[in-house]
Image (spheres, helix red, strand yellow):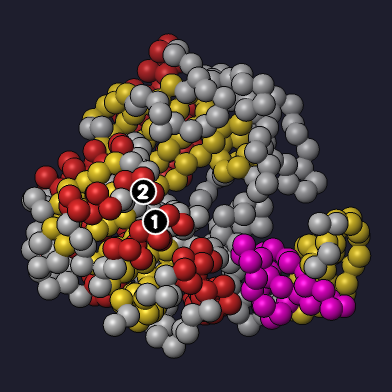
């Protein structure tokens, strides 16, 4: 695709619509221009800095007249950090655009009739809703416009700058997680600076402080994981001791020594310095009874918006409409949260997941929750879900599938078409790949209900639940 740098300025142009990746759309001379950090209805002075064959990229030089949908940003880092691009848009408008995103993907990519689509389920909590954040230390601090690096600049602790792998935006106050998230992060940063603990340089692979992971539950308990580059107890242990004394809310304080060239840590050992090796999240059961308990360790996957996760799973339960005698398969089960949420009304539940540690968590949680009708299997979905597996575990009456953003492997779709479960409930964090998969199943399955759910306010991301029924 051809690219052409330019410095074209367009005065007093209207922002027309919301577009892909959280950017807005401006139409100029028959070309679509994608512009971040503006709201549909804004009148702006626009700089077009790059043109491609079918579209252009630009940025707002000045806000001439604000849209009626514009709201003040809650985050002091808005416009620099790219995490919450829709923060200045009215929340009801965000929901409208997310709903339209689902509709457009299903209709255009999947050729699906969306007349059964329900209104999107918004999040009651739009700030401080995340139960997990990961921060990065870097020797290279992202400099804002006009800012110069000062003498003795220590680096940054925060989020990666958009599209730049080695530079980090220093975050002073983030509104995605409740307190004491900011207090803990800033404490660690100050301690490292005061004690001369060097930040990590991802290019040269030097330095010590690498990452900081903060997890919390609805009861106000916190897990803190400090990730460092080398085994230096004389640096690490005094910091951890002072940290747990400073924050009694920390019930699980752990560390990881990562000597690798990248930041992934799923294959590394986790050491507990203080407290438990996990925190526990509670979730009400859909059909009543004692709450479900889910142990969350350093590597566990758990929906990052805990309150909204319960609403998402409740839609899955409603659409599955279980009667109590069904065999249910939960594909891409993770730590088995959906499987156990539905187990109360199933004869048998079978969960499959690629990550072995997640399956270990699922089995542990199922035992804790008394879900004796659940069994879990680890392995590549396309290789596990075979004819012999189905013959051994029973043909499912209902399948719930919640794949990653890439959607389901073609072989998995083919196997689902062979299995012919009466119902499939497809949960997706990417309506585009969901639409592709639904199109492949259209020969045998009819879309009966579509339910979008907003799990990530102030971003363009949207979750979607679709009920498929086997055609007669």
Q: Residues within 10 Å of mark 2 (few under 14, many from 20)?
A: some
Residue at 55 percent across and 29 percent down: it is: 262
Disc with the residue nearer the chain's start (2 vs 1): 2
Quick check: can you spot residue 19?
Answer: yes
Residue at 73 percent across and 46 percent down: it is: 144
Quick check: can you spot residue 451?
Answer: no
Residue named by callout 2: 381
On the rendered structure, is 361 left or right of 178? Answer: left
Q: How many marks?
A: 2
Marks 2 and 1: CB-CB under 8 Å? yes
Image coordinates of residue 276 in percent, x first then y, are 23, 32
Image coordinates of residue 355 in percent, x first then y, are 35, 40
* SS at circle 1: helix
Image coordinates of residue 90 in percent, x first then y, are 55, 76
On the rendered structure, is 441 left or right of 68? Answer: left
Residue at 74 percent across and 31 percent down: it is: 150
Q: Front-most of 426 and 209?
A: 426
Q: Residue 140: give its label.
A: none
* Gap in angstroms between the C-alphas marked 2 and 1: 7 Å
Q: Front-most of 419 and 297?
A: 419
Quadrant containing the N terminus is bottom right
* SS at circle 2: helix
On the rendered structure, is 421 left or right of 142? Answer: left
Q: Front-most of 145 and 120?
A: 120
Residue at 27 percent across and 72 percent down: it is: 423
Q: Is residue 448 magenta?
A: no
Quadrant containing the C terminus is bottom left
- Part of the protein shown in magenta: 15-41
Residue named by callout 1: 412
On the rendered structure, is 3 left or right of 417? Answer: right
Q: Residues within 10 Å of mark 1 (few under 14, many from 20)?
A: some
Q: Is residue 16 magenta?
A: yes
């Amino acid at each position: 695709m051809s690219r052409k740098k330019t410095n074209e300025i367009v005065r007093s142009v209207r922002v027309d619509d919301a577009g892909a990746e959280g950017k807005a759309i401006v139409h100029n001379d028959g070309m679509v221009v994608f512009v971040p950090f503006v709201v549909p209805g804004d009148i702006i002075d626009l700089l077009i800095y790059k043109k491609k064959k079918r579209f252009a990229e630009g940025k707002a030089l000045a806000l001439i007249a604000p849209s009626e949908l514009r709201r003040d940003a809650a985050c002091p880092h808005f416009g620099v950090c790219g995490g919450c691009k829709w923060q200045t848009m009215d929340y009801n408008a965000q929901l409208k655009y997310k709903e339209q995103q689902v509709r457009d993907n299903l209709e255009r990519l999947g050729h699906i009739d969306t007349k059964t689509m329900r209104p999107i389920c918004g999040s009651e909590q739009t700030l401080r809703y995340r139960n997990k954040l990961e921060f990065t230390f870097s020797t290279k601090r992202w400099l804002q416009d006009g800012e110069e690096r000062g003498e003795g600049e220590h680096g940054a602790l925060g989020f990666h700058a958009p599209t730049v792998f080695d530079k980090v935006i220093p975050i002073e106050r983030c509104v995605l997680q409740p307190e004491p998230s900011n207090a803990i992060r800033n404490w660690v940063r100050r301690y490292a600076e005061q004690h001369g603990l060097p930040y990590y340089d991802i290019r040269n692979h030097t330095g010590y402080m690498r990452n900081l992971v903060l997890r919390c539950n609805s009861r106000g308990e916190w897990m803190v994981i400090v990730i460092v580059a080398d085994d230096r107890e004389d640096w690490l242990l005094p910091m951890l001791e002072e940290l747990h004394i400073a924050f009694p809310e920390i019930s699980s304080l752990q560390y990881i020594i990562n000597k690798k060239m990248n930041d992934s840590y799923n294959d590394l050992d986790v050491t507990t310095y203080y407290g438990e090796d996990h925190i526990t999240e509670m979730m009400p059961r859909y059909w009543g009874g004692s709450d479900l308990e889910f142990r969350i360790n350093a590597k566990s996957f758990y929906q990052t918006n805990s309150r909204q996760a319960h609403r998402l799973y409740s839609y899955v339960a409603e659409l599955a409409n279980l009667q109590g005698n069904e065999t249910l398969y939960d594909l891409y089960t993770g730590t088995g949260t959906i499987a156990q949420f539905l187990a109360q009304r199933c004869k048998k539940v079978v969960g499959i997941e690629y990550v072995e540690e997640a399956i270990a968590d699922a089995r542990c949680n199922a035992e804790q929750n008394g879900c004796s009708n659940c069994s879990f299997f680890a392995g590549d979905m396309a290789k596990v879900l075979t004819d012999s597996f189905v013959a051994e575990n029973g043909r499912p009456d209902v399948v719930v599938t919640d794949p990653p953003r890439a959607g389901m492997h073609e072989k998995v779709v083919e196997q689902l078409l062979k299995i012919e479960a009466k119902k499939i409930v497809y949960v997706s964090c990417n309506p585009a790949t969901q639409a592709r998969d639904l199109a492949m199943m259209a020969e045998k399955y009819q879309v009966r209900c579509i339910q979008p759910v907003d799990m990530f306010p102030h971003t363009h991301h949207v979750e979607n639940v679709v009920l498929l029924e086997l055609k007669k």
